[in-house]
Image (tube, rainbow, N blue to C red):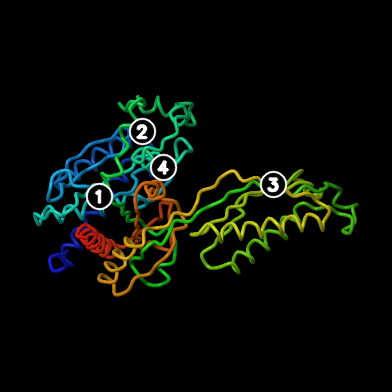
Amino acid sequence: MNESLMTLSEAQAAAARVMTRCDALAEISETPDGLMRVYLSPEQMRANALVGEWMAAAGMRVWQDAVGNICGRYEGREANAPALLLGSHLDTVRNAGRYDGMLGVLSAIETVQWLHQHDLRLPLAVEIVGFGDEEGTRFGITLLGSRGITGSWPQSWITHPDGNGITVAQAMADVGLDATKIATAARQVSDIVAYLELHIEQGPCLEQEDLALGVVTAINGARRLDCCFSGEAGHAGTVPMTHRKDALAAAAEWMVFVEQTTREHGPQLVATVGTLHCAPGAVNVIPGEVKFSLDVRSPEDAPLEALLSTLLTQAEAIALRRGLRFQAEEYYRINATACDASLQQALSAAVENVQGRSLALPSGAGHDAIAIAERWPVGMLFVRCDRGISHHPAESVMEADVAKGVQAYLQAVCDIAQR
């Protein structure tokens, strides 16, 4: 199949279309002064309709499923063949960039567009899905679109309210969906062979290596904890340094330990203290209590657990030495999602063909592939983004990189389907 794959001029034309369409989708926003498109909003429905038009123009049969994903199918050589699923999400965070999610959906459409233009059918059907909710911006629960397809929606989700007290079920009714039919969005395991997702990297690794594309090895697992050092508040002028039980000093000591130890545990582990609250919070009072968050991530669960154990043990030791108490409560946990080895291989071969070499790297951010991996093998292709900036209006990709991405995506799709 290689000799007939996308030429450079075809790839350039495809990338130009993708960039123009990303701009068109960026115009569909709830807020005029910054891109925001959330689940079950009128803006999501408009975006679905527009993406559906593009899918149909690429020769696909198009439908919106029961949870509001926009779906398209390009038949294989035989009717009802199982499908290779491609996709990403069409929802955004607040004040978003225009490529996170959207780039993957639109690049997938270009792979099918090329097959359609060349009147080619593969041994597998190709399906594309624009997921309705990956970010969780509206309801504070994530991956609603992809969990619709896997059939793993908890029943409690339909009563979950947004910031205005509108439940998921009510929001569905407002856009013409029926919460009692959510289960019909679920796909049979035999319907789908594997899932591929193209996405901006949202990090600086490809840029540092001067590469357009990379292949994802795993999506990081994460643990989030609420932590607290409790000491004793006291007068900043009258309590001698040797008598203090300063909760903030303990937290500061531990935060430096977190940074240093995480670096020593390996380049793919990260740990972040993102929030900090001191009480009583006065300039002339020794902090008696400090509450803060800890976020630890790794592409493998065992190193993550080992690091977390080391960090918490040291926090207890610091508290004991300083005469304080330390408490930590985990409130969020998601295991690492490994990408399928054979899909990584196919993507790596395609990337090498396009740019000379491939780079394997983990994803520090979550993706729809996390949910899909519970049912089917997943693979991910990363595209370089400017300075690794994402979830921000400054999010930016180069058209030449997108061209390479579409070329590699198409080759991987064809290679996997031929297998």
Tell which of 220 and 47 is nearer to you. 220
Locate residue 114, reporting x and y percent: 15, 56
Q: Which residue is mark 1?
A: 21
Q: CA distance from mark 3 to mark 4?
A: 29 Å
Q: Which residue is mark 2?
A: 41
> Quick check: marks 1 and 3 in contact, CB under 8 Å?
no
Mark 4 lies on a secondary structure that is loop
Which numbered disc, 2 or 1, marks the residue that appears first in the sequence?
1
Amino acid type, residue under disc 4 in the picture:
Leu
Which numbered disc, 2 or 4, marks the residue that appears first in the sequence?
2
Q: Which residue is mark 3?
A: 291
> Quick check: marks 2 and 1 in contact, CB under 8 Å?
no
Which numbered disc, 3 or 4, marks the residue that appears first in the sequence?
4
Amino acid type, residue under disc 1 in the picture:
Arg
Quick one: which residue is furthest to the bottom in this view?
356
Label placed on residue 143: 4
Judged by depth in the image, the label closer to the viewer, 3 or 2, is 3
Amino acid type, residue under disc 3 in the picture:
Lys
